[in-house]
Image (cartoon, grey):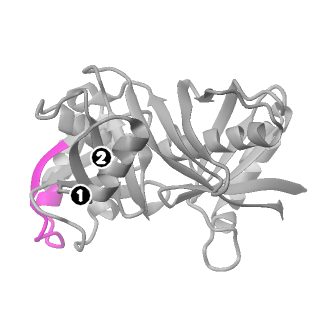
């Protein structure tokens, strides 16, 4: 059958997005899982993406209540994806914009399994077909609240002793569960050129692998910081550089839920004002995170960009 799709990216974390009827889910989602590796291939024989986002709702014209299934590049399913959720929100907004259904302020509600997410379109660039989107993420579990915390502590000790990681000095580590399990490793110095330890964490028994993030404090680019402050009408209090390894994907250009995990980990030390944004810059670009209340919901802001649309035979 022919499947219509659009390709989007958030900080170069890219996705194939398609919208189907609820009655098609039972047949199409397993089929897309089996074909995910080929569809997402960047070797010239696929579309090229980090994953597939399948949207469904009661009507193709109703976008206020949408269910999303997240398929990783290896065909496994994910419970959360911050960049993917923003891209899906941009996809739905673009459909409204093209059909003249848009309102002055646009909100989107998306459900992934039992988790509910809401997003606001802060600005839309019709020429570039991109949007600045602020996503509200459910409150995550942190450290001892995670059922897999003790196992992760053992894993971190193994990483500290790993002979292949002699140049990475881990200052502290945190576990964060936002539907997906995240291990945040805060380092003393930049870890941009070292091998990423994520590959060494995929035999983790507490789940089907971990999302692993290296993060270190840095001054950031003042021009980019000021630009994002103007767009969000807020203040950036701290800046971190980061690299992410996502289960089912490998090392990626960016990870939205991972940026949230990094920011919540930093905030847990009570060294940053909760009234300010934390900017996390990954290889694909900057993301901004804010958690105003300890243990509360997390705001994730960043761009979502339309790339192209097409049809593929599946």
Which corner quadrant holds the N terminus? bottom right
**Which of the labelled discs sits on residue 279, or is there none?**
2
Taking the image as drawn, is residue 113 in sight? Answer: yes
Q: Is residue 295 above or below residue 26?
A: above
- The local crowd at label 2, few if under 14, some if 14 to 19, many if 20 or more residues have their Cα within 10 Å, is many
**Magenta segment includes 163:** yes
Q: Is residue 141 left or right of residue 130?
A: left
Dot 2 lies on which element? Answer: strand
Regarding residue 208, the answer to whether it shows in the image is no
Residue under the image location 70 percent in, 39 percent down: 92
Residue 127: x and y, percent?
A: 67, 56
Q: Is residue 200 in the magenta section?
A: no
242 versus 291 height, above or below: below
Callout 1 environment at 10 Å: few (<14), some (14 to 19), or many (20+)? some
Residue at image position (13%, 72%) is 163
Q: Quadrant of residue 238?
A: top left
Residue 68 sits in which quadrant? top right
Q: Is residue 300 left or right of residue 215?
A: right
Q: Considering the image in quadrants, where does the C terminus appear?
A: bottom right
Q: Which residues are magenta?
A: 158-173
In the displayed structure, would residue 275 be above or below residue 131? Answer: above
Which residue is located at x 62 percent, y 79 percent? 43
Q: Which residue is mark 1?
A: 220
Q: Locate residue 281, reporting x and y percent.
A: 32, 55
Label at residue 189: none
- C-alpha gap between disc 2 and disc 1: 9 Å
Q: Residue 233: image x %, image y %?
A: 38, 35
> Looking at the image, which residue sits at the far right?
1
Q: Nearer the viewer, residue 194 or 129?
A: 129
Residues at discs 2 and 1 in contact (Cβ within 8 Å): yes
């Amino acid at each position: 059958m022919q499947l219509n799709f659009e390709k989007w990216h958030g900080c170069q974390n890219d996705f194939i997005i398609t919208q189907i009827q609820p009655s098609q889910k039972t047949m199409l989602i397993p089929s897309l899982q089996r074909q995910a590796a080929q569809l997402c291939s960047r070797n010239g024989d696929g579309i090229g993406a980090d994953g597939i986002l399948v949207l469904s709702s009661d009507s193709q014209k109703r976008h206020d209540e949408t269910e999303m299934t997240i398929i990783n590049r290896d065909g496994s399913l994910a419970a959360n994806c911050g960049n993917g959720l923003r891209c899906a929100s941009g996809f739905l907004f673009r459909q409204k914009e093209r059909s003249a259904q848009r309102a002055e302020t646009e909100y989107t509600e998306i459900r992934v399994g039992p988790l509910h997410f809401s997003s606001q379109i802060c600005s839309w660039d019709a020429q570039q077909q991109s949007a600045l989107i602020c996503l509200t993420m459910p409150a995550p579990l942190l450290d001892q609240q995670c059922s897999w915390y003790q196992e992760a502590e053992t894993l971190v000790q193994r990483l500290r002793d790993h002979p292949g990681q002699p140049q990475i000095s881990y200052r502290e580590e945190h576990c964060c569960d936002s539907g997906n399990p995240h291990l945040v490793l805060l380092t003393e110095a930049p870890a941009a050129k070292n091998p990423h330890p994520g590959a060494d964490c995929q035999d983790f028994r507490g789940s089907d692998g971990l999302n692993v993030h290296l993060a270190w404090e840095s001054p950031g680019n003042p021009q980019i910081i000021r630009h994002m402050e103007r767009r969000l009408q807020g203040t950036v209090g701290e800046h971190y550089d980061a690299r992410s390894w996502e289960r089912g994907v490998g090392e990626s250009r960016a990870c939205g839920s991972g940026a949230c995990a990094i920011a919540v980990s930093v905030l847990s030390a009570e060294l940053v004002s909760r009234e300010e944004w934390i900017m996390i810059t990954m290889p694909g670009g900057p993301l901004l995170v804010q958690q105003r209340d300890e243990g509360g919901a997390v705001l994730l802001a960043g761009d979502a960009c339309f790339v192209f649309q097409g049809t593929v035979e599946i």
